Amino acid sequence: MQDRAARQKTADARLAEILTGVAIQASAAILAVDFRKAGTRHKTDNSPVTIADEAAQTVIHDGLAHLVPGTPVVSEEALGDWQDKAPPAEFLLVDPLDGTAEFIAGRLEYTVNIALVRNGTPVAGIVAAPAQGLIWRGATDYGAERLRFTQGEDRMPPDIIHTRPWPSGECVAAVSRSHYDAASAAFLERCAPVRLVESGSAIKFCRLAEGAVDVYPRLAPTSEWDVAAGHAVVVAAGGVVVGPDGGPIRYGRWHAGFRVEGFTAWGDPSAARKLGA
């Protein structure tokens, strides 16, 4: 049984390496689009979408079909395939361009998110920041890394990253620039003294995973594809991500439109037990 579990962990880490290549290719597709000429329009939920979202979706769809054939993919830009159908126990959860509003505004905080979900839990995740040339990746019980890349797919050797212990004085909290909700603000009052760092997209998870941030609350509903990859990276780096009630978050909830009710990501699990209660 232990050998089987070890093989699974190694396989998840190898998959993270494969997904890294797909994320780099999707990043190049996004960077090829001028944000000032992105053909922005709005979907039925009033969220923006651009030709960069669509270009990244195409690259990811084709790349995953070639590299991991037979693995189902749930993507923000192809939800029609899952309107009335539950995903299997293992599937890939994708946001081809997380932070479209940041992209349209010319800010550098948008990401490409790809996660492997198994039995409702993200076990491997890739978060790429195309404009910054950075990727954060991790697999459960295998560790997390940050690496630099170029548009030519050249990669620097990865750096191992870890979350940090809860500080004795001021803590640092990542908050959304465009979706900072009242419940999250009230929650952070319990963590005072606290310094807020605003950002867009899943980069907030990554800053926590690399030890630059201590906590990231989002206590309002959001989409699974915005959370799963960052969730996996944080856990791989030593942190924990919990729901508003302090319990685990389940992914693949097709009947709820692939939505989560909110979450709090902690770098130090002991702080989650103490302050999240």
Image (tube, helix red, strand yellow):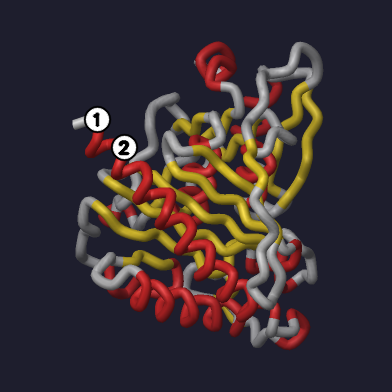
Q: Quadrant of residue 110?
A: bottom right
> Alpha-carbon neighbours of circle 2 within 10 Å: few (<14), some, or many (≥20)?
few
User: Is residue 197 or residue 162 the one in the foreground?
Assistant: 162
> Residue 245: image x %, image y %?
43, 26
> Residue 209: image x %, image y %?
62, 38
Q: Are marks 2 and 1 in contact (CB under 8 Å)?
A: yes
- Give left or right: position of 254 versus 34: left
Q: Amino acid at mark 2?
A: Ala
> Residue 249: image x %, image y %?
38, 37
Check disc 1 and report the residue beneath it.
2
> Residue 217: image x %, image y %?
60, 35
Tell me the tag on residue 267: none
Q: Does residue 135 lie above or below 42 as drawn?
A: above
**SS at mark 2?**
helix
User: Is residue 10 or residue 63 the one in the foreground?
Assistant: 10
Q: Residue at x 73, y 88 (%)?
A: 37
